[in-house]
Image: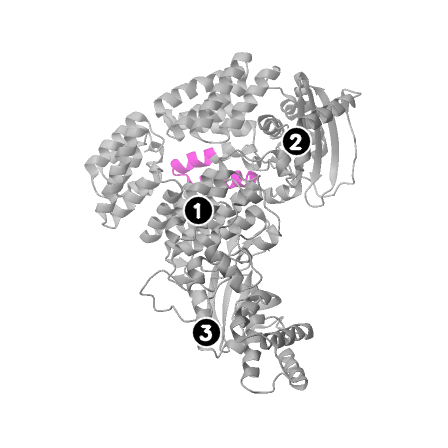
Amino acid sequence: MAFMTPERWQQIERLVQEVLERDPDLRSAFLDQRCDGDPDLRAEVESLASVAQSGQDFLSNDALQDGAEVLEEAHDESLEGLKVGHYIIKKHIGAGGMGEVYLAEDIDLGRPVALKLLDPTLTNNSSLHARFTREARLAASLDHPNICTIHEVSETQGRPFIAMQYVEGQTLKELIDGKPLRLERLLSLALQVADALAGAHSHGIIHRDIKSQNIMVTPTGQVKVLDFGLAKSLDPNATHELDLTFTGEVRGTPSFMSPEQARGEQMDQRTDIFSFGVVLYEMATGRTPFAGKNRADLISGLLKDKQKPARDLNDEIPPKLSSIIDRALAKDPESRYQDMPSMIIDLKAAQDVTPPTAFQQLGIPQLIRNHAALIVLFLIGLSLGLVAVRVTFSRRHQPTSLTPIKSIAVLPFKPLVAENRDESLEMGMADSLISRLTNIREIDVRPLTAVRRYVAVDQDPLAAGREQSVDAVLDGNIQKAGDRIRVTVRLVRVDSGTTLWTDTFDDTFTDIFTVEDSISERVAGTLTAKLTGEEKALVAQHSTNNPEAYELNLKGRYLRSKRTGESIKKSIDYFNEAIAKDPNYALAYAGLANSYQLLSNYNVTTPEEAYSKAKLAAAEALKRDDRLAEAHLALAEIKRGYDWDFAGAEQEYKRALELNPNYAAAHSSYGEYLGQMGRSNEAIAQMKRAKEIEPLSLTINTDLGSLLYFAGRVDESIEQLRKTLELDSSWVRTHIELGYAFRQKRQYQEAIKAFKNALEIDRNESYALSQLAHTYGLIGQNDEAYKIIEQLHRQAKQQYVLPTDIAAAYVGVGDKTRAFEWLEKGFRDRDDGIPFLKVDPSWDPIRSDARFQSLLQRIGLT
């Protein structure tokens, strides 16, 4: 309930009078419309109207004034500073269903929480009291990065309260604000909501009140689903399902409820799917699909009318997404998606659909789009016609902060003309500058893998800088027209938004290297007082002087960064073309070596084929440039993963880091190597250094979690992996490593849940299948384990499956003979799982076996 101010009381008084003037059958619909989103207002109005109907003259002016004074006295008292359990209330932040919500501080843990207290006027209502407790109990049973976490459920002086995670941000309703969201953002948010619902449904819980007002979006773009106040167990034997409705009233929000919910019929997870379809429709069009002047009209339309397809209202969304929404909004539950995982698969497929044009993303009117070609030509002609000198400096300097800059993010360059995108060039320019600037030892430069997400034309560079936790951001525009190129760059302090300098460069594309030289020199000169001679040489170094080879290499690196089997194979083609243009292009050889290694990592081909080609490419790179850190890292990975020359691998890792101390990938890979060798403290230190350079890397954060459980620090591992899932709950490997950690604590059901979560995202992930089978075997569910083993064998006939994955499954069911047969095959194939044998807990059941010890000795891990 909101604090009872005079304005609030006047609003209640007016509504009570209006309710009493209406026919009793129409009052509920009237209150639905007038009190939407404010359940406490509705409760007050209904309560006072009920008193008035009982015959008391409560609505006389004198009585109203007395009531206002009583209520104002009861609620106007500030709770700031009040201690509730081990929480100190800081301020009132809003009203939730049946209670007030306050920002409070957890004294014991020193963290902010949202404290929800049941309205004191409702504590004597046993059903509402029970509903409040039920909301907490159901929500507290859910542990998901996209669901608001319940920390504690308790009571103070007979008044129940819930301590919840404090979520900063805005509701999805506020974010939409009557306007469609950009496709990229829509899908990102939708997948997070879908994942939250899938998590709740997997625990047998449906929400029943999914709406945009109940979805929070944090400043970093993370979704949190709130308010399980109408949540219901899917268990038909559940004893806590209470009659919590007013007579004849269906609970929920009419504009978001499903047809079966509106009719008061039995509900299951498909009712949440319908409501989620309404949310999707609102994100895609800026409005909900069904409307009416009152509740009765709205529900009538919901039950009878077919919604207008979202694409009819917004032609910028792809047909695939529009059809997903239509299926979710089917009137008949049997015609909808039957579960959230099925819907998630289709939503992810929609991400692969060609995105709208940049003109559409910018909201440029259709008339202008129709003449886009003419406008592009005009702008290009204008920009080229204005070029009077080879390089133009705007030199708009601003006063700089005294705080030294120690870290920087170079964002992907944006097109000068939005319709004329060349993403490989835009990403490649950033990649080249990153490679140069990482040679400055005093500065941490975020790698391309950390910044490649910031490709939107309207990306806020300061927001990206804050997300990457850097002191400065280099942001630029680039446009290529024929053999001409124009680049505009600015360096901005993140803390103050101050522009340190801006430069504009116009040149022929053949002199792209001159442009890069100028930019890197200006950045280096601004960020550091003095460069060593070696640093100057490395910053100014050109990997090639052939612009065609340079552009082909950019395309290769861009495709490799997409990390799919097909994109990696295409990247190899581009690297080979770059080498054909410039046979001395060391960086292209290093890229080629890395791509071949990835073919093995992604099970596209056998380790023998992939690593033999990678080894040749790495050797060619080093022959041409022995000071190329990327080439030394590629060689280190080959020596570790295939040659099993562990001492030689360590030398190459150290050489790569000597050449480039800020090389996140080298720190990360060296950390993994040290973990495999059993040198846990050194391994964790290297991985933490990699995380400092690239704090949002899902791979690095996940690897840190796995190193922690290798070291026996299982609770820390679980905490780290959960934090990683908060960054992106769709990252498959994080779920798998979390399963490992839970299994180490003998929390087998939690482990099984984590492995299944991974398989919901990728049902053919052999690593997850292997470990799920292993876990079933450990708890005696061999029938389930063997079903998965059969699936792995079928999969191995279609594509390469690591023999160690199949061996681990057999270890779980206790079949040592088959396990060692597959381990020997892994040894012969030199599969990527072999170097982990020394430290991987999966092998503990056979670790003392003489055959296993012999295998370790032959590998060189004793």
Q: Give left or right: position of 417 versus 648.
A: right
> Foreground residue, 132 or 370?
370
Q: Kindly state the secondary structure of the residue where label 2 is placed.
A: helix
Name the spot of residue 427 as percent of width and height, x first: 59, 29
Ranked by sequence position, the earlier of labels 1 and 3 is 3
**Is residue 596 shown in magenta?**
no
Vertical position of residue 743 compared to residue 28: above or below: above
The image quadrant of residue 506 is top right
Prevailing SS of the magenta stretch: helix
Name the spot of residue 288 as percent of width and height, x first: 55, 53
> Which amino acid type is marked by label 2?
Asn
* Magenta span of residues: 669-694
Residue plotted at (46% across, 50% down): 329
Q: Kindly state the secondary structure of the residue where label 1 is placed.
A: helix
Do we see residue 139 in this rendering? no
Name the spot of residue 509 as percent of width and height, x first: 66, 18
Residue where numbered disc 2 is placed: 370
> Which amino acid type is marked by label 3?
Thr
Name the spot of residue 235 as percent of width and height, x first: 33, 61
Please give the label number shown on residue 373. Answer: none
Ranked by sequence position, the earlier of labels 2 and 3 is 3
Which quarter of the image is occupied by the C terminus?
A: top left
Residue where numbered disc 1 is placed: 327
Q: CA distance from mark 1 to mark 3?
A: 33 Å
Q: Kindly state the secondary structure of the residue where label 3 is placed.
A: loop
Please give the label number shown on residue 247. Answer: 3
Ranked by sequence position, the earlier of labels 1 and 2 is 1
Which quarter of the image is occupied by the N terminus?
A: bottom right
Q: Give left or right: position of 819 versus 601.
A: left
Badge 1 local density, few (<14 within 10 Å), some, or many (20+)?
A: some
